[in-house]
Image: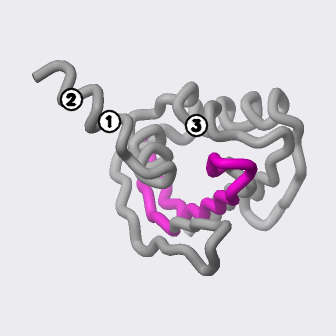
Amino acid sequence: LFLFTASAQNNRSPLEDMANAIKTNRLADIEKYCDNFLQITVNNNPSIYSHNQAMIVLRDFFDKNTPKDFVIMDNGSPNATSKFMIADFTTNTGAKYSLYILMKLKDVNYVLQEMRFTKE
């Protein structure tokens, strides 16, 4: 049973992993998908960060906005080399955010390219 569970977890798509990481506030699971540079937009203020800077920004954001409820609204693949997800989440303080995630194929793996947080 243990081997089956571990194997099933490894068969999740990158977007499923991202959704689970956000739902459970596990930044390390987000970090493994980060590219060398990542665009993060919070309330229409976009910035491009290095991998390490992006992790600091995301840690700070999620420390202040711990997801309490997370619902995937849409996801898909507009082309053969990218995947996206749109989700709504409510924080532990009651704030509501819309989240857009874009992942692109790099070599043989999908990497996180962009995250957009928009407060509703």
Residue 64 placement (x, y as % from top left):
59, 35
User: Eyeballing the image, is 17 above or below 24?
Assistant: below
Marks 2 & 1, CB-CB < 8 Å contact: yes
Instruction: Check disc 3 and report the residue beneath it.
Output: 30
Q: Is residue 36 left or right of residue 16?
A: right
Instruction: Check disc 2 and report the residue beneath it.
Output: 5
Mark 1 nearby-residue class (10 Å; few <14, some 14–19, many ≥20): few
Could you tell me the amino acid type at mark 1?
Gln
Among the 4 quarters of the image, the one containing residue 100: bottom right
Q: CA distance from mark 3 to mark 2?
A: 20 Å
Question: Which secondary structure dominates the residues rendered in magenta?
Answer: strand
Residue 102 on the magenta span: yes
Q: How many marks?
A: 3
Which of discs 3 and 2 lies nearer the camera? The answer is 2
* Label whose residue precedes the other's in the sequence (3 or 2): 2
Which residue is more in the foreground, 15 or 79?
79
Instruction: Check disc 1 and report the residue beneath it.
Output: 9
What's the residue at 46%, 38% (across, down)? 21
Residue 116 placement (x, y as % from top left):
68, 61
